[in-house]
Amino acid sequence: MTKKICYCFGYTTADIEQDLLTHGESRILATVIASKKAGACECATKNPKGR
């Protein structure tokens, strides 16, 4: 089962696994961190758990 990891950008565990296989590291993590710093994070409203 694929679990949604990032509700702001819609990333799933499968996305992260594929990113690791393709690039040897998670570029998704860098994207999320940069977006969060830019104020584009909406976890508090999009994540059902409020995180």
Image: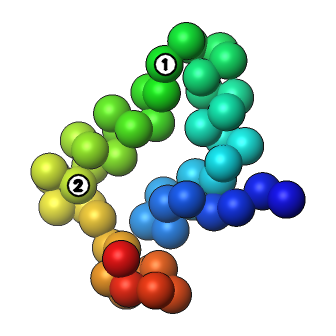
**Residue in the foreground of this view, choosing between 42 and 4:** 4
Residue depicted at x 44% and y 27%: 27
Which residue carries the number 1 mark?
A: 25
Q: Position of residue 18 (x, y in %)?
A: 69, 29
Residue depicted at x 33% and y 33%: 30
Q: Quick check: 51 left or right of 15?
A: left
Residue depicted at x 35% and y 46%: 32
Q: What is the three-letter code of the residue carrying label 1?
A: Glu
**Secondary structure type for disc 2:** helix
Eye-nearest disc, 1 or 2: 1
- Seen from this angle, which residue lies furthest right? 1
Quadrant housing residue 10: bottom right
Is there a contact, CB below 8 Å, between mark 1 and mark 2? no
Which residue carries the number 2 mark?
A: 36
Q: How is the image coloured?
A: rainbow
The span from disc 1 to disc 2 (Cα, nearest Å) is 19 Å
Binning the other alpha carbons within 10 Å of mark 1 as few (below 14), some (14 to 19) or many (20 upward) gives some
Residue depicted at x 66% and y 48%: 13
Q: Quadrant of the C terminus?
A: bottom left
